Amino acid sequence: MARIDFENHFAATEWLAALRRDATQAPAGALSLFGPGSPMAARLTDLGEGRLAAMDEAGIDVAVLSLSAPGIERFEPLAATKIAKAANDELAGAISKYPSRFRGFAALSARDTDAAVVEFERCVKELGFVGWNTHSNFGDSYLDEKRYWPLLAKAEELAAPIYIHPDLPIIPQFCTYGFGLAGPSYGYGAETALAMMRLVIGGVFDVFPKLKIILGHLGEGLPFMMDRVNRPYVQGLVRTDPAIAPTLKKTPAEYLLDNMVVTTSGNYSTSAFVCTKSELGMERIVLGSDYPYESMKTCVDFLEAQAMSPSEAQQLYETNAGSLGVSA
Ligand code: GRE
Ligand code: ZN
């Protein structure tokens, strides 16, 4: 059985240089991780032996690599198009060096939308990438907005999943207490759940029914909310003006089941795992480690200690990846 990790981050040379030049309106404390000489920067830039050793130690066979947050989408759009292309080429170089160990998600300058659509296609068709790793916000906007529908249409056409990774929230009240509130502890996940629910309530999945969205961190709390998101709809309390929100064909939870897959990254609570498994089913959970922000070994050790039959473990680690177009 192979283990395939869908949340494994790297830092591309030009992205890191640009990040160090431009603070991207990050809340206090968010960028200290990336300074020259920092251990995190060293792990992020390692696309070779150090990362492979960490994968071997955890028993991870394949890492689907993604450009780290802060998302390229929040950089100045035209500059970001160039940085994303360079990052994608750098990643393709690492994959061609270790083709049995690495796969790639595209990085795209979503706000330079026409160019991003072209780059998305290049990444999938020419570089062999599996999908697009995007972020919970684009600095001033969110993925569900109509201006980004050409990217959603392209994802559906290419059968390429979109990983919505957390980023520093743009809702100011999330940023009051700096990275402590805005970051992985709370703001990251809360805003990413919002990004997913904006797709659902915005009717995006009625327009693009085959779209597959991947969320990390056991679905950023949404498995716990499966009944809650439906209640106002099933009770008939929702009377939204059709001018601002479409009438949905299905209930919100049905879209979460039909269009969302979650990964196991950075949420090592047995009751959260049990909830996710019982609400979504094992067929909607894939391995994600969030390396190097989290340890690959801690992730796999946690999963090995959970109640799973051998065939469920194989689904999670390997075979569910096939439905996202990835095999070992
Ligand atoms: C993440 O990718 O999940 C992440 C960051 C930065 C800090 C912590 C963290 O991108 O978990
Ligand atoms: Zn991550």
Image (spheres, helix red, strand yellow):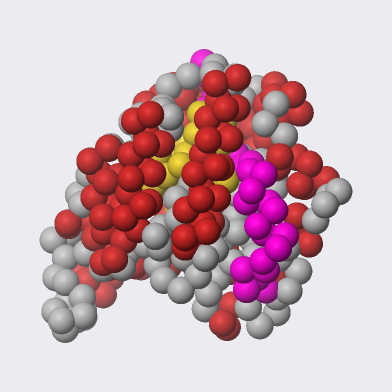
Q: Is residue 139 left or right of residue 228?
A: right
Q: Residue sitting at 32 percent across and 49 percent down?
A: 117
Which segment is the magenta one? Answer: 1-27
Q: Residue sitting at 29 percent across and 66 percent down?
A: 147
Q: Residue sitting at 73 percent across and 74 percent down?
A: 28
Q: Is residue 102 above or below residue 181?
A: above
Rendered image quadrant of residue 291 = top right
Looking at the image, which is closer to me, 87 or 188?
A: 87
Residue 36 location (% of width, % of height): 82, 52
Residue 182 location (% of width, % of height): 63, 71
Residue 154 location (% of width, % of height): 27, 46
Rendered image quadrant of residue 297 = top right
Q: Is residue 250 left or right of residue 128?
A: left
Looking at the image, which is closer to me, 213 or 127?
A: 127
Q: Is residue 277 left or right of residue 288?
A: left
Looking at the image, which is closer to me, 1 or 163?
A: 163
